[in-house]
Each structure stands twice: as structure tokens, then as C-alpha cells.
Image (cartoon, rainbow, N blue to C red):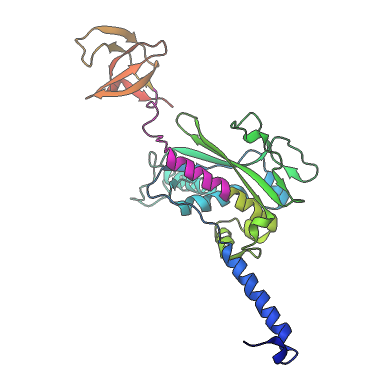
């Protein structure tokens, strides 16, 4: 066995340094980079919206909307639709088409936009909206429920911690499908204090500050923690915004009659005035739809008499 004292005097410190480096390398290898969860099938179509308070500007960060879009795009659980800058640009193109500026066959017009099934709002969790001491966040207590409002801290420069909230809302029913919180602290960044390949993906998405600043990395990890919990929850109990909710309400385009059965020879339930709002139950028979009115009457009405409510 080779002994240190049998080597030249300068070799022992070198061997010790090499051993220390190998030990550190081994320790870092154990700290695996966090991963974005994935789905085999789509849960639905989703838009990501900014929270009402611009808390991120206090830390020189970009909107968390850009950050969450990176997670959502890579997880493949949702089809993303843009309701931000992309939509604004699309509206300009549509305006040009409406003014007749586009070439024939450009195929830009109404009725082409894909509807969002869900809206995801990223925010910070902090029941005390205290801007002194560099603690920022919305007063969420009593708003999101599930005890999330009890989280105190939001984002702290002093302790390098972040507590965040993701709220997923069903567009059609406005039901809060999921509310999850995420947490991270500086010590979670041992595997990538310099940014690493993991944070590199944020720059292209317009969220470079989450890669280039320490507090940005902490916030990014907190949102990833929440996003992982959100996907796990949705996988266990996947919602279906397309079928779980009652169909869009309709209004009578012209006067008509509600019948007990899907034919005009059955018993009359009531007469319907133009402009009256009705609520489809989902049952259909040819052109006949089963509907209910605001007082609970149910019956069948020919669908050509309807306009979709706006």
C-alpha cells in the first residue's frame, strides 16, 4: 500500500486536495437536478395569466407567467393558448385581415381561436402584504382556501426563501380545480448554484432573470415544487372541463314553444319569448335540445330558434 510519507513532501497536500475534490464531486452527483413532470395524455387546453399584483418587479424578475409557460410546455399535460403578448399580436393581424389588407386565401377570421379549458395563475403566498423588509405578496388569506393563506413569507431576500401558489380555474364553471403551494430555499440550489443547464432554458422564454439571479432561482424552484404537486394532483383526479360542465347557455332568437317531448305534438310546457335565456341539459334528439329555464321548467325546443349566449 502506498504511504504519504514515501512520496515527495509536496504530494501529500495534492492527494488530500484530490480526495476532497472527488468527495465534493460525489456529493454533487447525489444532488440530482429537479425534473418537470410529464403526462402521457393531455388534460386540456390552458392559458397562463399574470396575478394582479406585480410583486416580481420588486426583485427585478420577469413575470412568472413566462416561467410557468416553460414548465407547462415541457410537461405536455396541457395545450397552451396565448392570452398575453401573442394574443395582442394576433389581434393586429386579424385587424389587418378585417381591413382587407391580407392576400386572398390568408384564412384569418372569426371563429378560429381555440378556447382555454383552464386558466393557471401563479402568485406568491403571503397573508401579510408587507412591503417593508422586502417581503412581498398578495393578501391571499381567505381567498384560495385549503390553508394556503396561512403561509407567511412570500419571497424573502434575507432568508433566500420563496412560498408560492398556483391556482387552476375551470373557465366554464369558474370552479377552482386545484390550489397548490410550493416552497424553496437557497439550500435547494446546491446542485446548480451557477445556473447550470437547467436554468438555461428560461432565457429563451423571456425569463432570464430566473436563471441569472439567486433569488430568481429560488422562486423558480418554488414554482416547480408547486407545479409538480399540481400535475400529481391532476393525474390522480383528472378534471374534464369539456364534459363535466353544463353546455353554454342559449337565448331565444325568436319566439317559440317548449314541449314536454322532442316533437311539437307533445304537451306544451310554456311559451318562450325572444331574448329568453335557456340552459341546455346536454340531451339532444336531432334538432331538438332539452333545456331548462330560470324557474326550473324543463322541456324540448328546436335548436334553430337559439343563439349562443355571449
Could you say where residue 253 lies in the image, as x and y percent from the top left? 35, 20
Is residue 83 something that shows in the picture? Answer: no
Q: Residue 16 vs residue 72: left or right?
A: right
Above or below, comparing residue 32 to residue 80 in the picture: below
- Is residue 243 shown in magenta? yes
Could you say where residue 306 lies in the image, as x and y percent from the top left? 33, 22
Q: The N terminus lies in which quarter of the figure?
A: bottom right
Query: Which quadrant would residue 251 be assigned to in this image?
Result: top left
Query: Which quadrant would residue 10 be assigned to in this image?
Result: bottom right
Q: Magenta span covers which residues? A: 224-249
Query: Which is more toward the observer, 117 or 255?
Result: 117
Q: Residue 47 vs residue 195: left or right?
A: left
Query: Which is more toward the observer, 149 or 92?
Result: 149
Is residue 132 something that shows in the picture? Answer: yes
Could you say where residue 145 lies in the image, as x and y percent from the top left? 60, 30
Could you say where residue 93 lies in the image, as x and y percent from the top left? 46, 48
- Is residue 150 shown in magenta? no
- What residue is rendered at 47% in x and 33% in y? 171
- What residue is rendered at 24% in x and 7% in y? 267
Residue extending furthest right?
132
- What residue is rendered at 41% in x and 50% in y? 102
Q: Residue 188 vs residue 295: left or right?
A: right
Amino acid at each position: 500500500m502506498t504511504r504519504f510519507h514515501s512520496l515527495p513532501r509536496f504530494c501529500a497536500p495534492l492527494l488530500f486536495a484530490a480526495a476532497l475534490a472527488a468527495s465534493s464531486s460525489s456529493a454533487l452527483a447525489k444532488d440530482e437536478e429537479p425534473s418537470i413532470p410529464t403526462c402521457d395524455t393531455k388534460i386540456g387546453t390552458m392559458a397562463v395569466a399574470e396575478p394582479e399584483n406585480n410583486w416580481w418587479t420588486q426583485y427585478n424578475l420577469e413575470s412568472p407567467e413566462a416561467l410557468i409557460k416553460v414548465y407547462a410546455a415541457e410537461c405536455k399535460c396541457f395545450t397552451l393558448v396565448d392570452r398575453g403578448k401573442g394574443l395582442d399580436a394576433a389581434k393586429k393581424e386579424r385587424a389587418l385581415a378585417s381591413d382587407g389588407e391580407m392576400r386572398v386565401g390568408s384564412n384569418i377570421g372569426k371563429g378560429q381561436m381555440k378556447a382555454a379549458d383552464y386558466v393557471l395563475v401563479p402568485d406568491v403566498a403571503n397573508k401579510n402584504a408587507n412591503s417593508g423588509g422586502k417581503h412581498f405578496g398578495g393578501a391571499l388569506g381567505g381567498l384560495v382556501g385549503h390553508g394556503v393563506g396561512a403561509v407567511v413569507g412570500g419571497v424573502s431576500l434575507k432568508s433566500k426563501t420563496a412560498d408560492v401558489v398556483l391556482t387552476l380555474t375551470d373557465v366554464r364553471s369558474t370552479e377552482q380545480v386545484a390550489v397548490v403551494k410550493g416552497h424553496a430555499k437557497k439550500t435547494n440550489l446546491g446542485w446548480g448554484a451557477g445556473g447550470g443547464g437547467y436554468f438555461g432554458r428560461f432565457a429563451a422564454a423571456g425569463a432570464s432573470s430566473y436563471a441569472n439571479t439567486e433569488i430568481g432561482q429560488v422562486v423558480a424552484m418554488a414554482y416547480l415544487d408547486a407545479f409538480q404537486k399540481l400535475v400529481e394532483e391532476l393525474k390522480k383526479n383528472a378534471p374534464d372541463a369539456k364534459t363535466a360542465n353544463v353546455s353554454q347557455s342559449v337565448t331565444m332568437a325568436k319566439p317559440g314553444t317548449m314541449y314536454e317531448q322532442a316533437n311539437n305534438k307533445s304537451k306544451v310546457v310554456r311559451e318562450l319569448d325572444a331574448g329568453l335565456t335557456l340552459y341546455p341539459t346536454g340531451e339532444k334528439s336531432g334538432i331538438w335540445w332539452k333545456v331548462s329555464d330560470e324557474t326550473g321548467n324543463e322541456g324540448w325546443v328546436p335548436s334553430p330558434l337559439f343563439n349562443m349566449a355571449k
